[in-house]
Amino acid sequence: MKIDILRDDNLVNIKLIGKYDIEELLFFSTVFSDEISKKPEVIALDLEELTYIDSSGIGSLIRYMNIATKENIEFLCYNLNKNIEDIFKISKMDQFLHILSNDDYHKKCEAICSADN
């Protein structure tokens, strides 16, 4: 898996590219821990280029959402491709995670950035 990170004031955008499975847990955990320690207002996962996620990856997203919530950081996913959207629906992840469309995410970004100014 490849991870691209974009930081903008109080928002951290983490783009997951490729497969997120048990072999990638430590890698993502390290990235997530580093980003959450900076105390952003929002951590957003862009899942457009995520091609696969297994049960360990799904479980870790719930864990990271709980960590973020305890730190008063909003944790959301957006821009889900059809494959990942289907996996989230089958596993009922869409009932636990805050999931936004690409358009709704960008509206949220604009609101956060205008509030910072």
Image (spheres, rainbow, N blue to C red):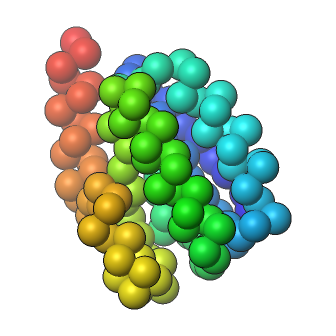
* Residue 71 screen position, x and y as percent: 41, 26
Q: Give the x, y percent position of residue 3.
A: 67, 51
User: Position of 34 compared to 71: left or right?
Assistant: right
For residue 38, which quarter of the picture? top right
Q: Is residue 32 visible?
A: yes
- Identify the image quadrant of residue 18: bottom right
Vertical comparison of 35 with 84: above or below: above
Asked if residue 95 is positioned above or below residue 68 in the image, the reply reads below
Residue 85 visible in this rendered orientation of the protein: no
Residue 76 location (% of width, % of height): 36, 50
Q: Residue at x 77, y 48 (%)?
A: 27
Residue at the spot x=18%, y=20% of the render? 115
| Nearest to the observer: residue 17 or residue 35 | 35
Q: Is residue 59 left or right of residue 75?
A: right
- Residue sitting at 73 percent across and 38 percent down? 30
- Give the vertical position of 18 relative to 83 (above or below): above
Q: Quadrant of the N terminus?
A: bottom right
Quadrant of image for the C terminus: top left
Q: Position of residue 28 (x, y in %)?
A: 69, 49
Is 25 situated left or right of 83 in this image? Answer: right
Front residue (pair 78, 94)? 94
Q: Which residue corresponds to the image point at 65% horizontal and 28% vertical from the top-left?
A: 34
Farthest residue toward the top?
117
Q: Residue furthest right?
A: 23
Residue 42 vertical placement versus 115 (above, below): below
